[in-house]
Image (spheres, rainbow, N blue to C red):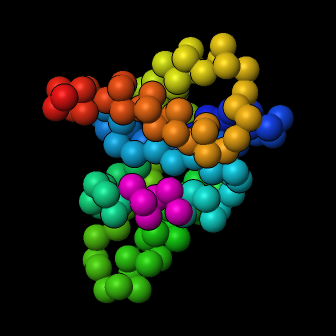
């Protein structure tokens, strides 16, 4: 799990992304902020769509760590014994860091977006076209 950033109307917005161990995109979310609330919302969305992972590898971002700790807290409140193991190792998330390249390569010539909604729609299309599972279905 990692995040990258883009400019929308001259302000930075953040693209949260998660990939599996094979490099396939699990989920993504565009957010105007990079904080605990946004990270928690991303994890909730990813878990609702894809199920509970056994472990998550991320960089040393405090907001992402606290967001996943919030998910673990909610799991404990729900009475679930299993929780998500958090691994914060700088070099283990190189797979997703390299995976950001394809989005940056496509969006860099755009030089920023004019509207948050159009940025979200464009990135959704890029992610869908890049996902081999989605492409194989068509």
Which residue does the image show at 36% across and 26% down from the upper left?
129
The residue closer to the viewer here, 87 or 52, is 52
Q: Is residue 55 left or right of residue 92?
A: left
Image-based side of 16 in relation to 80, left or right? right
Q: Which secondary structure class fits the magenta region best?
A: helix
Residue 48 in view, yes or no: yes
Q: Is residue 43 magenta?
A: yes
In the image, residue 68 sits, relative to residue 11, either above or below, namely below
The stretch of residues the image draws in magenta is 41-46
Spot occupied by residue 3 in the image (x, y as percentages of width and height): 58, 40
Q: Position of residue 111 (x, y in %)?
A: 73, 20
Tell me residue 42's x, y (percent): 50, 56
Q: Residue at x 54, y 63 (%)?
A: 40
* Camera-nearest residue between 109 and 114: 114
Residue furthest to the right in view is: 10
Q: Position of residue 95 (x, y in %)?
A: 42, 26
Give the vertical position of 41 relative to 8 (above or below): below
Q: Quadrant of residue 53?
A: bottom left
């Amino acid at each position: 799990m990692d995040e990258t950033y883009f400019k929308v109307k001259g302000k930075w917005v953040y693209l949260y992304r998660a990939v599996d161990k094979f490099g396939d995109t699990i989920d993504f979310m565009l957010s105007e902020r990079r904080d605990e609330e946004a990270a928690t919302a991303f994890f909730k969305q990813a878990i609702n769509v894809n199920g509970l992972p056994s472990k998550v590898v991320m960089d040393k971002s405090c907001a992402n760590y606290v967001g996943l700790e919030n998910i673990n807290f909610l799991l404990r409140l729900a009475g679930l014994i299993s929780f998500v193991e958090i691994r914060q190792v700088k070099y283990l998330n190189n797979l997703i860091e390299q995976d950001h390249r394809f989005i940056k390569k496509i969006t860099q010539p755009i030089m920023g977006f004019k509207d948050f909604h159009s940025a979200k729609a464009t990135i959704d299309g890029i992610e869908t076209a890049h996902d081999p599972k989605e492409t194989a279905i068509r």
